[in-house]
Image (spheres, helix red, strand yellow):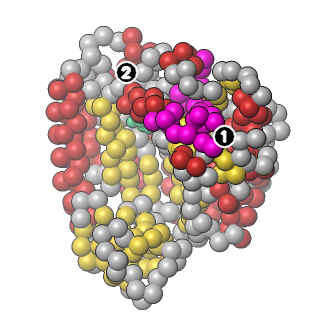
């Protein structure tokens, strides 16, 4: 039997949660989870396909893993799981004949039996099927990345079909977990000492469970704002959520944040472009004005809510004027943080058929211009924290100085501080004395 399994994770938080779920199932089936590929009998690569570069990385990594040896075999069993597995399917065996196993995004709970089939001598084992009735999200605390911060998936898949995006094809249709199950998991994590819960999903605010179970007694304009109230009511210290989809962002979400202080002061609301023409071509279902209306409701909150976003530059047909609209929107939104991506053509998406590609140097130029603008905005936004206190969940010692500790604020900023007497897992107040472009610095405050 192959006893030691190593899982390497690429991509988003959903992949992190899938790895934790896979590890939980494998350990239950008698496998040991090992922290390095070098000591493993089975290496599983949990992959991301959202951009071409991420996908290429996987095939490079397979080349490295095939050179590892194990006591029992010439090389470990190699499995590809996650989005690349779901999309490429059996073609992976042709491109990389060393791969033994392809595990789709909904086969996480069946990995142990798939490994057994490889061990019995079956070649090219593949499972791209749907989840089976009765499968539940089950993540053992032992498999979680952190003993203080836990990712709790509330919805998987995506129904939005934005023209650039591969996610609906790699992760299937939206499927929400029951609120009862989510609340029970959060209560359990709280009793185990977890301090911060991240409710995660491709579009958390599109949450739509099949039944009301667990939401009774919680009013709200949408199932997601009701869920936020239900989770807020568990009393767990900090709750964050991502990602929110603009079209489904109801102002009642902001009301819920105003009602529960443990719902953190941060919203991640990707816009992708500031140009109505490009937003239409992207099939986002919102224009710039709709988006700005959502932002206005966020800015009207009782607390200052940090706002972050994703932006794609160089979508097919994007002109200088379109890009100028993007720059204008970014100036108006004053984001606390912005993830900027150069458009990457994804085979099988509607945008892949569009002509009028933006040349690579042009994309780079726009990327750099937007990055420069965002840095200047961020300097101002971060500068405003100087002299203010923020609440920080201590995570570890800072990499820069042994005297400093590091963690995240409720508003999702990295905060470094003189950490005397604090330990990972503590929640402390830090008085900010200095703002850097991507972090804050300060001292403990009583
Ligand atoms: N579901 C979320 C939404 O659409 O708002 C985001 C999911 S995606 C995993 C994260 C980010 O990757 C997107 O917000 C987008 O900015 C970026 N992205 C997705 N597809 C891309 C593509 N084809 N090229 C470049 N960036 C892309």
Rendering coords of residue 121 (x, y %)? 74, 25
Question: Which element type, helix, strand or loop, lies under badge 1?
Answer: loop
- Please tell me which of labels 2 and 1 falls first in the chain: 1
Confirm whether the magenta stretch covers residue 69. Answer: yes
Depth check: give the residue in front, 15 or 187: 15
Give the quarter of the image for residue 360.
top left
Per the image, label 2 sits on a secondary structure element best described as loop
Q: Residue 282 sits in which quadrant?
A: top left
At a point 50% along the width and 63% down the height, the residue shown is: 264
222 relative position to 404: left or right: right
For image coordinates 22% across by 28% down, the residue present is 363
Q: Residues within 10 Å of mark 2 (few under 14, many from 20)?
A: many
Q: Which label sits in the foreground, 2 or 1?
A: 1
Q: Which residue is mark 2?
A: 345
The percent coordinates of residue 238 (x first, y second) are 55, 66
Residue 71 appears anywhere in the view: yes
**At 78% across and 49% down in the image, what residue appears?**
30
Q: Any atom of ligand 1 within 8 Å of the CB at mark 2?
A: yes
Mark 1 sits on what residue? Answer: 72
Query: Which residue extends farthest right?
Result: 134
**Is 17 on the left-hand or right-hand side of 47?**
right
Q: Residues within 10 Å of mark 1 (few under 14, many from 20)?
A: few
Where does ligand 1 appear, by image quarter? Answer: top left
Q: Nearer the viewer, residue 44 or 257?
A: 44
Q: Which residues are magenta?
A: 64-90
CB of mark 1 near ligand 1 (< 8 Å): no
Question: Is residue 445 positioned above or below 249 on the image?
Answer: below
Image quarter (top left, top right, bottom left or bottom right) of the N terminus: top right
Q: Is residue 390 visible?
A: no
């Amino acid at each position: 039997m192959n006893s030691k399994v190593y899982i390497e994770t690429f991509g988003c938080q959903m992949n992190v949660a899938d790895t934790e779920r896979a590890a939980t199932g494998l350990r239950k089936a008698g496998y040991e989870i090992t922290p390095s590929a070098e000591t493993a009998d089975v290496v599983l690569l949990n992959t991301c396909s959202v951009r071409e570069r991420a996908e290429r990385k996987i095939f490079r990594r397979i080349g490295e893993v095939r050179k590892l040896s194990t006591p029992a075999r010439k090389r470990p069993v190699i499995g590809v799981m996650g989005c690349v597995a779901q999309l490429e399917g059996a073609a992976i065996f042709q491109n990389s004949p060393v791969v033994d196993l392809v595990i789709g995004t909904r086969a996480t709970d069946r990995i142990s039996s798939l490994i057994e089939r490889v061990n019995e001598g079956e070649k090219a084992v593949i499972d791209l099927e749907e989840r089976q009735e009765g499968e539940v999200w089950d993540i053992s605390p032992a498999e979680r990345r952190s003993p203080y911060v836990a990712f709790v998936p509330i919805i998987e898949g995506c129904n939005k079909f934005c023209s650039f995006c591969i996610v609906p094809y790699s992760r299937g249709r939206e499927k929400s977990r029951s609120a009862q199950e989510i609340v029970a998991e959060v209560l359990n994590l709280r009793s185990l000492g977890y301090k911060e819960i991240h409710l995660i999903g491709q579009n958390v605010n599109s949450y739509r469970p099949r039944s009301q179970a667990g939401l009774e007694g919680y009013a709200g304009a949408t199932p997601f704002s009701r869920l936020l109230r239900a989770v807020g009511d568990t009393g767990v210290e900090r709750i964050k959520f991502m990602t929110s989809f603009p079209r489904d962002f109801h102002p009642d979400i902001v009301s819920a944040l105003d009602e529960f202080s443990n719902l953190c002061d941060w919203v991640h609301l990707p816009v992708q472009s500031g140009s109505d023409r490009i937003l239409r071509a992207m099939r986002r279902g919102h224009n710039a004005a709709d988006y700005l209306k959502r932002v206005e409701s966020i800015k009207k909150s009782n607390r200052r809510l940090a706002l972050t976003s994703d932006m794609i530059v160089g979508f097919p047909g994007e002109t200088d004027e379109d890009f100028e609209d993007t720059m204008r929107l970014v100036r108006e939104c004053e984001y606390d943080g912005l993830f900027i991506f150069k458009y990457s053509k994804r085979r099988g998406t509607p945008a892949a058929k569009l002509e009028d590609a933006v040349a690579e140097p042009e994309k780079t130029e726009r990327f750099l211009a937007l990055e420069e603008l965002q840095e200047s905005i961020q300097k101002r936004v971060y500068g405003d924290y100087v002299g203010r206190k923020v609440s920080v969940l201590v995570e570890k010692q800072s990499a820069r100085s042994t005297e400093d500790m590091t963690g995240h604020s409720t508003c999702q900023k990295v905060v470094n501080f003189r950490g005397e007497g604090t330990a990972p897992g503590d929640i402390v107040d830090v008085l900010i004395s200095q703002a850097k472009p991507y972090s804050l610095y300060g001292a403990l405050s009583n």
